[in-house]
Image (cartoon, helix red, strand yellow):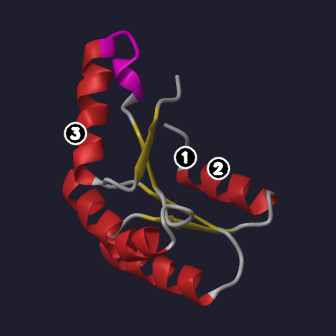
Amino acid sequence: MSDAAGLREEGESYGAKGYSVATLDQFRAAVKSALAGSVSTVIDAKVEDEISAKAASLIALVFEKEKGKSMRFSIQTDQRLYRNAAAIVEQAVRFKEIAPNGIIFSVF
């Protein structure tokens, strides 16, 4: 996986506000700041499934209100599975169940 600072910095290089978070409380604070701001925001969170589900639900209302135009939740598959297509698909399906407003991607 890419490191959190790298994704945050990449977003910032495009003019977005960037955050790197590791806890649900940090995620909540970043979402609150993003909603109060007027620029695009990148929030990179290294979290497990349970926290991902809670985080996705925090932004789901805005996602629905905006008809999917904002507040997507990006989830990266485990790159260690790169030789096992079935495992990647299984993980992606699980992620989509966790976060219907999610974008699932793989980086190898």
Q: Position of residue 9 (x, y in %)?
A: 70, 57
Q: Quadrant of residue 92?
A: top left
Q: Which residues are magenta?
A: 79-85
Does residue 62 sit above or below 84 in this rendering? below
Q: Position of residue 52 (x, y in %)?
A: 29, 58
Spatial CA distance of label 1 from label 2 is 5 Å
Amino acid carrying label 2: it is Gly
What residue do we see at 32% from left, 23% from top?
A: 88
Please name the residue that numbered disc 1 is placed on: 3
Residue 84 in magenta? yes
Please name the residue that numbered disc 3 is placed on: 94
Q: Is residue 38 left or right of residue 57?
A: right
Does residue 4 sit above or below 33 in this rendering? above
Please name the residue that numbered disc 2 is placed on: 6
Q: Is residue 48 among the parts visible in the rendering?
A: no
Looking at the picture, tell me which residue is in the foreground, 77 or 35.
Answer: 35
Extreme residue toward the front, this view: 67
Looking at the picture, tell me which residue is in the foreground, 71 or 77.
Answer: 71
